[in-house]
Amino acid sequence: MRAIVIGSTKHLLFASLYATVGIVVAILITAVWLLNDRPNLSLWHTTHLTSEYHQQSGLADFNQYLKLEDKLFAEVERKIYQQYQPRLSSPFNRYERHSMSDPALWQQNWNRSFEWPNPDAEFGLLLLHGMSDSLYSLSHIAEHYQHQAHIVGLRLPGHGTIPSGLTDITWPDLAGAVALATEHLSQTLAGKPVYVVGFSTGAALALNHELENISSNKPCAFAGMIFLSPAVGLAPIAAGAYWQAKLGGLLGQDKLYWNSIQTEYDPFKYLSFAVNAGDVVYQLTQRNRTIIADLSPAQVKLIPPMLTFQSVVDNTVSSLAVVKQLYQLMPASQGHELVLFDVNRARSHNYLLIQDPLAEFAPYWLANPLPYRLSLIENSPHNEPYVRVRELSYKQPIEDVVELELTWPAEVYSLSHVALPFPIEDPLYGPLANANKDIIQIGREIYQGERGIYSITAADMLRQKWNPFYPYMMSRIDVFTTQ
């Protein structure tokens, strides 16, 4: 009897094992099939550029970085623009000369690094854009401070050229470029304060630069750090990006190197997104978390003042992580400030919310006094659609409310990850008609019809791309850089 039980148990275990393996294999086959059932890769997805900067490039300074960048863009011209021969010409392909999406149509090519010298500069300003992005995302901030600051805009490695540039970069590559630009700006300013503005991944890189300095007992480089939609934490699924790329290499399926393969109609941003790019951001955020956890209380106090702007809803990075994994860990009285943009709670919108996005923040704000200044941009309860600023601070336990002369647009229910850096007047992402009809205006390209026909998804067309509260944001940055 005992032998029968043992034998039956073995059979059941083997059957369960085989069934599990079969299910896993079936899931993998289905996933690979679905991921491959996407548009074909184009020249800009498969071409390898040899002149891109990597940490092992051995460059001594930022000027060498710029010279290498010149070679890089000459390579793009030779390998892409001169080689691409479309069967049908497209007015919305950034890799076709004279199309509406051609970056060359703009007075400044924001895909390139730049330096705007200012002999009368009050301070230096380093601009760091986000992943798959370009310096266009910080162009309005650059123009705002061009008469007040000496400005360096850094094109991060892998960016501004072709989407395949993101398939083989690492976060140390990005950090190495940031170190070159920071050192150059610090030497040029000769003792004047240097501020950094980082958007998304650019914010994570700025934070990493200072955390690495502090952990190595080196002096900090920045007088203050300004973050827009910072990449502090990502969704847990981001950890799987590495394995998707590995599977693609194992199976020889190039499409598995990509999370999305899209029409490249934006002159200053990749629409196709490489799997490796997501893994790079994930590894960078993990590195920052590890360093912060290892810092002593005295070292945490050395982190330069931070001013952060974040929408409470963000489909790219975790809004909660900004509070939970960064600001709540800061000591009081260090000058850190956080500005959160709530959703539009007009009654017509409030009834449609699946859940209150502010609910998960409440435990961190109610239990103890905040160690930082919190400014919540929310609907004015008695004067819709106007907004107010509700101030919470460790300096005063009583809430302070300031009414603003700014309103929610009637059709907008929230901001988004990409919206914060752009005012309503932005000629590319803004909603106002542009007098220049030769360039694409993505903010007005919204089409209605049946789903599943256009290569541009409805989600992309409808995502909020400009910030109705941009004037308030800039007023806060003005104060922060003069303290």
Image (cartoon, rainbow, N blue to C red):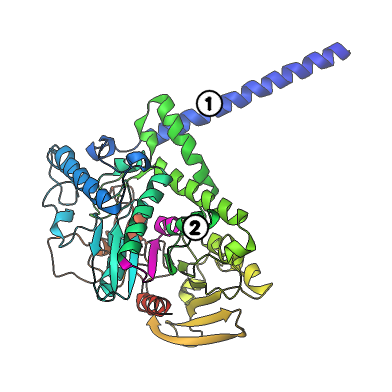
Instruction: List x then y, in percent, for residue 149.
Output: 29, 72
Q: Which mark is residue 304?
A: none
Instruction: List x then y, in percent, for residue 117.
Output: 23, 67
Q: Is residue 164 left or right of residue 97?
A: right
Q: Which mark is residue 25?
A: 1
- Amino acid at circle 2: Lys
- The relative height of residue 454 versus residue 313 in the rendered view (above or below) is above
Looking at the picture, tell me which residue is in the foreground, 319 or 31.
319
Instruction: List x then y, in percent, for residue 90.
Output: 15, 47
Q: Which residue is mark 2?
A: 218
What residue lies at 19% left-to-right and 50% top-to-bottom?
A: 94
Task: Describe the element under mark 2 as helix, strand or loop.
Answer: loop
Q: Residues within 10 Å of mark 1 (few under 14, many from 20)?
A: few
- The relative height of residue 377 versus residue 299 in the rendered view (above or below) is below
Screen quadrant of the N terminus:
top right
Image-quadrant location for residue 358:
bottom right
Foreground mark, 1 or 2, reads 2
Q: Is residue 204 magenta?
A: yes
| Residue found at the far right of this picture | 1
Give the magenta-colored segment's residue range.
Answer: 189-205
Q: Is residue 326 left or right of residue 279?
A: right
Looking at the picture, tell me which residue is in the foreground, 306 or 41.
306
- Amino acid at circle 1: Val
